[in-house]
Image (tube, rainbow, N blue to C red):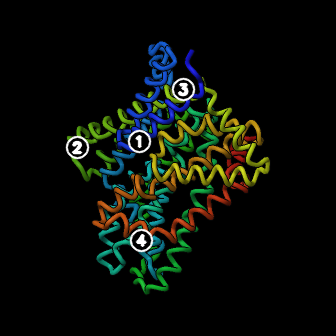
């Protein structure tokens, strides 16, 4: 008779071993699940049924649409227009381009919902611009990478959809709105950090724009920015579900990019689709294998074990929340955000939501924000890698430059964790309690 405790060791040990060997996370999840099933004399067909069930969700269809929207808008000229508009608003202040960097990430986050897409599209323009203007190269990369994390919080965010799926159907609309204020607060915290560093290092001011020039830059960028309004507005008004609004946004982005802005020819849709399909395939494979792994976790009662362990350490809610945040920050530094959302959500929900009474929407906002920090921390921060590649800066150097911004992000994370109104006020106002 197979021992369940031994099975837990097999599941988690094989997963950790494969991670250390730098096997892709999707394969780590699948292989460790199959090995454990074989040890338990369980039919492997059961696991593959869980894989299929894991991707049979209507809300999940929104993720490919969001990925495609980000690719179309990123290639179609919206990045330059957003940077021009942000520069017109805040470029005149000391260290103006650092504020531009934060603000353009705020705007683009409402379109792509992806930190890596933000770094790749906006960073390719603004990092060389900052370096040419006299900013330190590591500072330029650090602010680009950390400000891009707003895209994970400001709606729409496909990571919120992944959390909704893992949490058993928490309202996507409420999750979108829950990330709005924390995302904007993160931008404000980064603004303050940029101001302090810019004054100390005597970074230059940008050009002063007249009110007419500000209006002109807004006019040229509005059609692109309106993509985010379509997605969020459609969900809030009830006109569309999250999936339907994402589909409408794809059609709108296609029309604006190829028939209004017309900065790229129509034939460019082929490489855009190819790149989008590659990303979509990776995301869907990850979700499928994570569903298999998550079912195995539940079968072995690992969530209950972790719940009892955490409650055994302390029954104080503040202590438990701090422990959970520290654990997530550490895991976020060594694993990517998507798989962690799928793995940690069913493990931590019994602790925080069932036992401590935390609102699941608040829990989702806290978890997504926490893991977003991992996108810009070594050794596996994907946004950090993208920024260093664009800025031609070593990861070690960029990581040190990120430290002041990490501190700002931790402050916002603590506010979000211990002040539920920060994430719940907007969804409660607009969608009811």
Marks 2 and 4 in Cβ contact (< 8 Å): no
Closer to the N terminus: mark 3 or mark 1? 3
Residue underneath mark 3 = 7
Location of residue 331 with respect to 305 vertically, above or below: below
Q: What element does badge 1 sit on?
A: helix
Q: How far apart are marks 2 and 4 (CA)?
A: 28 Å
Q: Which residue is drawn at 37% across and 66% down?
A: 396
Location of residue 32 with respect to 78 vertically, above or below: above
Camera-side mark, 3 or 4: 3
Q: Residue at x 44, y 32 (%)?
A: 29
- From the viewer's side, name the closer residue of 332 and 116: 332
Locate residue 235, reporting x and y percent.
Answer: 58, 38
* Relative side of 10 to 389, left or right: right
Q: How far apart are marks 3 and 1 (CA)?
A: 18 Å
Closer to the N terminus: mark 2 or mark 1? 1
Q: Distance between the residues labelled 2 and 3?
A: 50 Å
Locate residue 56, reporting x and y percent.
Answer: 49, 22
- From the viewer's side, name the closer residue of 313 and 163: 313
Asked whether the viewer can see residue 11, the reply is: yes
Q: How crowded is mark 4: few (under 14 residues within 10 Å), some or many (20 or more)?
A: many
Residue underneath mark 4 = 87
Location of residue 425 with respect to 209 vertically, above or below: above
Closer to the N terminus: mark 3 or mark 4? 3
Locate residue 186, reporting x and y percent.
Answer: 57, 62
* Relative side of 363 to 213, left or right: right
Q: How far apart are marks 3 and 4 (CA)?
A: 56 Å
Residue underneath mark 1 = 19
Label placed on residue 369:
none
Camera-side mark, 2 or 3: 3
Closer to the N terminus: mark 2 or mark 3? 3
């Amino acid at each position: 008779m197979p021992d369940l405790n031994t099975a837990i060791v097999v599941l988690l040990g094989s997963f950790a071993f494969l991670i250390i060997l730098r096997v892709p996370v999707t394969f780590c999840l699948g292989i460790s699940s199959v090995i454990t099933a074989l040890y338990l004399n369980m039919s492997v067909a059961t696991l593959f049924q869980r894989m299929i069930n894991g991707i049979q969700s209507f809300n999940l269809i929104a993720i490919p649409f969001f990925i495609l929207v980000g690719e179309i808008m990123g290639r179609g000229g919206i990045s330059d227009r957003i940077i021009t508009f942000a520069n017109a608003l805040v470029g005149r202040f000391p260290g103006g381009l650092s504020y531009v960097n934060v603000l353009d990430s705020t705007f683009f986050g409402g379109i792509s919902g992806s930190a890596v897409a933000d770094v790749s599209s906006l960073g390719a323009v603004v990092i060389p611009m900052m370096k040419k203007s006299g900013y330190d190269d590591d500072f330029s990369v650090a602010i680009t990478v950390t400000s891009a994390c707003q895209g994970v919080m400001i709606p729409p965010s496909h990571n919120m959809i992944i959390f909704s799926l893992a949490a058993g159907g928490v309202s996507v609309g409420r999750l979108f709105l829950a990330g709005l204020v924390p995302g904007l607060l993160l931008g404000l915290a980064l603004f303050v950090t940029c101001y302090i560093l810019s004054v100390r290092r005597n970074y230059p001011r940008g050009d002063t724009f007249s009110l007419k020039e500000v209006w002109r830059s807004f006019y040229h960028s509005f059609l692109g920015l309106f993509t985010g309004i379509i997605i969020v507005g459609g969900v809030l008004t009830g006109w569309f579900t999250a999936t339907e609004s994402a589909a409408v946004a794809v059609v709108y982005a296609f029309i604006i990019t190829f028939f209004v802005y017309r900065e790229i020819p129509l034939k460019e849709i082929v490489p855009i689709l190819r790149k989008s399909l590659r990303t979509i395939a990776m995301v869907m494979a990850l979700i499928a294998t994570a569903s298999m792994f998550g079912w195995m976790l539940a079968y072995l009662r690992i969530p209950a074990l972790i719940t009892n362990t955490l409650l055994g350490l302390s029954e104080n809610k503040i202590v438990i929340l701090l422990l959970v945040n520290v654990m997530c920050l550490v895991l976020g530094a060594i694993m990517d955000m998507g798989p962690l959302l799928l793995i940690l959500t069913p493990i931590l929900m019994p602790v925080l939501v069932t036992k401590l009474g935390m609102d699941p929407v608040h829990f989702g906002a806290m978890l997504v924000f926490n893991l977003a920090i991992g996108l810009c921390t070594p050794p596996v921060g994907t946004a950090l890698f993208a920024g260093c590649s664009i800025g031609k800066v070593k990861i070690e150097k960029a990581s040190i430059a990120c430290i002041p911004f990490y501190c700002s992000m931790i402050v916002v994370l603590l506010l979000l964790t211990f002040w539920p109104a920060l994430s719940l006020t907007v969804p409660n106002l607009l969608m009811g309690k």
